[in-house]
């Protein structure tokens, strides 16, 4: 069973999903980290992240793991390496390929079938788990999102905002796994809200629905 939290970059999905998982005793799954692992491996192997065949065979060749807060590729921790601006850009590129998405979606479905999960991404409520009993579409203003990302990475806000606009466009317009709110999703705009407030709201909804 999965509580699905989808939304654009910088809306606060990871902090909130982690918080909800801790509050309810569920396992947290960061689906974006999986696309980042494919992207990092492409860059390391010299595969072209924009080429469907190369990115798909890379996705199919690696084993992605999550252990004690670390992200692993074939058993090797890559938690920090997958957060660089180069990997962020390549992750957006690999995520448009249907073969890459099929491999990631299958792995996500396998994981969430094993117990109660809080999973965040772009297509969790629409593609990965359309039968999720609680779907949240978490968003915030573009400026608030860019400010949060810049504070995390130490980059310039204007630079982050420009790159973010491009990724938002690509995430929303791509043919496969495009970002949109599921019909039965509850939209939460986190602009001006603290992460704790958002966590409390989602945990409250989960309890109301008898999920925890
Ligand atoms: O959430 P994030 O920034 O770590 O995601 C990295 C990239 O992966 C981003 O370009 C969107 C993409 N992604 C996706 O296509 N589907 C998901 N379920 C999660 C992330």
Image (spheres, rainbow, N blue to C red):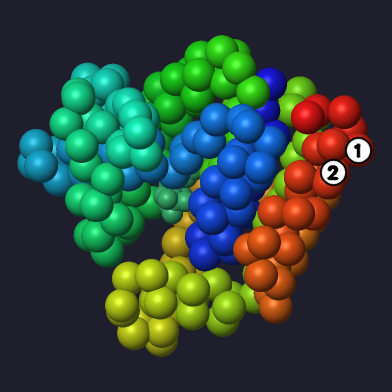
Q: How far from the left and from the top, in percent, is residue 43?
A: 15, 45
- Identify whether 178 is placed above or below 130: below
Specify whether tag 2 is near ligand 1 (CB below 8 Å).
no
Q: Give residue 210's quadrant in the image.
A: top right
Say if residue 71 shows up in the picture: yes
Say if residue 51 shows up in the picture: no
Q: Give residue 175's quadrant in the image.
A: top right
Between 9 and 19, the one nearer to me in the picture = 19
Quadrant location of the C terminus in the rendered image:
top right
Cβ–Cβ below 8 Å for labels 1 and 2?
yes
Q: Give residue 76's quadrant in the image.
A: top left
- Identify whether 211 is placed above or below 44: above
The residue at the point 32 percent across, 71 percent down is 153
Specify whether tag 1 is near ligand 1 (CB below 8 Å).
no
Between 167 and 199, the one nearer to me in the picture = 199
The residue at the point 45 percent across, 20 percent down is 107
The residue at the point 76 percent across, 23 percent down is 131
Which of the numbered marks, if any, corresponds to residue 205? 2
Left or right of residue 113: residue 56:
left
Q: Residues within 10 Å of mark 1 (few under 14, many from 20)?
A: few
Left or right of residue 134: residue 27:
left
Q: How far from the left and from the top, in percent, is residue 144?
A: 58, 78
Quadrant location of the N terminus in the rendered image:
top right
Q: Which residue is mark 1?
A: 208
Tell me the SS state at disc 1.
Answer: helix
């Amino acid at each position: 069973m999965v509580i699905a939290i989808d939304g654009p970059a910088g809306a606060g999905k990871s902090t909130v999903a982690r918080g909800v998982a801790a509050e309810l005793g569920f396992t947290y799954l960061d689906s974006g980290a999986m696309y980042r692992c494919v992207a990092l491996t492409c860059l390391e192997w010299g595969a072209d992240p924009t080429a469907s065949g190369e990115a798909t065979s890379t996705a199919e060749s690696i084993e992605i793991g999550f252990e004690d807060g670390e992200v692993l590729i074939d058993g090797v921790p890559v938690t920090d390496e997958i957060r660089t601006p180069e990997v962020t850009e390549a992750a957006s590129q690999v995520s448009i390929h249907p073969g890459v998405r099929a491999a990631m979606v299958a792995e996500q479905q396998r994981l969430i079938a094993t117990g109660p999960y809080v999973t965040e991404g772009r297509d969790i409520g629409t593609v990965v788990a359309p039968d999720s009993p609680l779907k949240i579409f978490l968003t915030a203003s573009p400026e608030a999102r860019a400010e949060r990302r810049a504070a995390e990475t130490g980059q310039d806000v204007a630079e982050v905002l420009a790159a973010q606009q491009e990724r938002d466009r690509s995430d929303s317009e791509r043919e496969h796994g495009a970002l949109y709110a599921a019909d039965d999703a509850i939209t939460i705009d986190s602009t001006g809200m603290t992460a704790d407030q958002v966590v409390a709201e989602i945990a409250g909804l989960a309890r109301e629905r008898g999920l925890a």
